[in-house]
Amino acid sequence: KYKGHRQEVCGLQWNDDGHALASGGNENYLCIWDAAMSQRSSSRRRAFQEVIDIVQPRLLLTQHKAAVKALDWCPFNRGLLASGGGSADRTIKFWNTSSNNGTLTNSIDTGSQVCSLVWSKHQRELCSSHG
């Protein structure tokens, strides 16, 4: 059983190597999940049918002030995640998810809700759409 969000999940993005999943929720949470945690948990369930594991996120980040829908991992800086907040937040936040506490490295007020984020695979650029 996965336990992290308290409301609907409205954004998901795997990192490039498939080891981490970012999820954004309507309760303004940004969760970082380790794929290895899920694999260990499913192995334990097979070995001990009566044991119910609860998998929690490695990081639970609560600095957004609205739903977190837009997510993308930086292709040239491992562990760097960009997240975008809804209409009451209007920010793009940059996270160092390699740190133990998920350090917020920058926050930019965009003036409108952030609908999507896409890092360029060829340039050091991030594109955003708003609505």
Image (tube, helix red, strand yellow):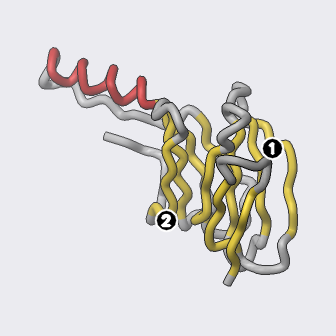
- The structure residue drawn at horizontal position 54% and vertical position 40%, both measured from the top left corner, is 15
**Residue type (three-letter) at the residue carrying disc 1:** Leu
Label 2–label 1 contact, CB within 8 A: no
- The structure residue drawn at horizontal position 15% and vertical position 21%, both measured from the top left corner, is 46
Q: Residues within 10 Å of mark 2 (few under 14, many from 20)?
A: some
Residue of label 1:
104
Name the side, left or right, on which 131 lies relative to 21.
right
Q: Earlier in the sequence, mark 2 or mark 1?
A: 2
Q: Is residue 125 above or below residue 96?
A: below
Residue of label 2:
10
Q: Which percent across, then down, holds residue 12?
A: 49, 54
In the picture as drawn, the residue positioned furthest to the bottom comes out as: 131
> Circle 2 sits in a helix, a strand or a loop, which is it?
strand
Q: Is residue 83 above or below residue 101?
A: below
Q: Which percent across, then down, holds residue 35?
A: 42, 30
Which sits in the foreground, 4 or 42?
42
3D distance between C-alphas at marks 2 and 1:
21 Å
- The structure residue drawn at horizontal position 25% and vertical position 30%, both measured from the top left corner, is 52
Q: Which disc number belongs to residue 41?
A: none
- The structure residue drawn at horizontal position 69% and vertical position 28%, both measured from the top left corner, is 98
Q: Quadrant of residue 49?
A: top left
Q: Quadrant of the C terminus?
A: bottom right
In the picture as drawn, the residue positioned furthest to the front comes out as: 122
Q: Residues within 10 Å of mark 1 (few under 14, many from 20)?
A: some
Q: Quadrant of residue 2?
A: top left
Q: Is residue 78 above or below residue 121?
A: above
